[in-house]
Amino acid sequence: MGVIAGILGVTLCVLVGFVGPGGPLPVLFQPFELLVIGGSGVFTVVMGNPGYILKQLIPKMLETIKGSGIDKGSYVDLLGLMASIFDTMRKEGVLGIEGDLSDPHNSPRFNKYPKASHDHHLMETFTGALRLFVDGVVNAFDLERLLDTEIETHHEEALIFPSQVTKLADSFPALGIVAAVLGIIITMQHLDGPPTEIGHHVAAALVGTMLGILLSYGYVAPLSNKMDHIVREQSAILKAVQAGLVSFAGGAPPQVALEFARKTIPSDFRPTSEELEEIIKEAKNAGK
């Protein structure tokens, strides 16, 4: 909702700031200037990106409306799920979680922690690493390298989209100048006209410059920044998974492994040590 509120707020402030001192609102409506700026900007993105990027770009931009969905509750659920898994593995070995991994979507254990288990990429990373435990083919060092590679690959792929939106934002001021120059060229054809007609064409040209700057810094650049935050939040929760799994694979007790995971959580979302103890206690009680 912050994105929608921001768009409405920016628009309202600009319009009130123009109309308040007596500016005529209709003069801001310049569809051909908007076509030059917006249309050209969109086609620069089309020209510079392969189809598989373009297919995902709009959905990725729309994700900013709802955000990443990652909050403190997501981390609490993740720690609870890891506590349950680690406790079972310590008591029963890797075979104790084999049934959960065979069908995680219908696993009562996983469904008990919906904020974590409903995150597709998070669960893909988590269950993929756990299957290596079950198969007995990985040690702590190899697991850390493997997860480093996976997280880095995911991060680089995800950053492609905010990067393209940033480039779009950077192009708008220049395209606004293009629209303004075209407007001045049109104005030069009417120099023999009355001053009001010349003033109208000059105003339309200046609107082009204004629109280019406004679209860039008022709308598209903040959207790119929000997309970047979403990517970082998604990578941060994967880092917590990595810290917990690698520590446990290295022989640490479940509580120590979970403390490693907790320490990697961003401070705004990080449960306290007391909250972690409660999470571990609840996971143990649920497993009885």
Image (cartoon, grey):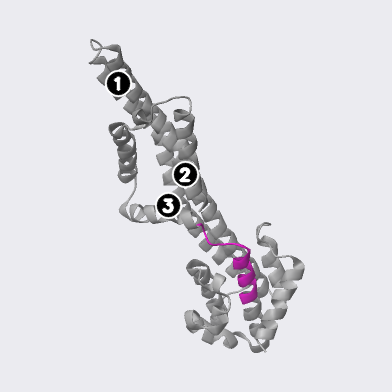
In percent of width and height, residue 38 lies at 33, 38
Could you tell me what secondary structure mostly forms the magenta stretch? helix
Q: Nearer the viewer, mark 1 or mark 3?
A: 1
Q: Residue 80 colored magenta?
A: yes
Residues in magenta, as a range: 67-81
Image mark for residue 201? 1
Q: Nearer the viewer, mark 3 or mark 2?
A: 2
Q: Determine the residue positioned at 57% across, 88% down.
A: 95
Q: Secondary structure at mark 3?
A: helix
- Snapshot quadrant of residue 243: bottom right
In percent of width and height, residue 164 lies at 41, 45
Image mark for residue 8? 2
Sort mark 1 into few (<14), some (14-19) or many (20+) by Cα contacts within 10 Å: some
Tag 1 and tag 3, C-beta contact below 8 Å: no
Q: Amino acid at mark 2?
A: Leu
Instruction: Name the one closer to the observer, 101 or 34.
Output: 34
The answer to whether 229 is drawn above or below residue 74 in the figure is above
Nearer-N-terminus badge (1/3)? 3
Q: Amino acid at mark 3?
A: Met
Side of 58 where 152 appears, left or right = right
Instruction: Name the one closer to the observer, 149 or 167.
Output: 167
Q: Determine the residue positioned at 34% across, 47% down.
A: 49
Q: CA distance from mark 2 to mark 1?
A: 28 Å
Q: CA distance from mark 3 to mark 2?
A: 17 Å
Sort mark 2 into few (<14), some (14-19) or many (20+) by Cα contacts within 10 Å: few
Q: Secondary structure at mark 2?
A: helix
Q: Residue 283 colored magenta?
A: no
Instruction: Name the one closer to the observer, 133 or 279.
Output: 279
Q: Which residue is mark 3?
A: 61
Nearer-N-terminus badge (3/2)? 2
The answer, for residue 252, to whether it is visible in the render is no
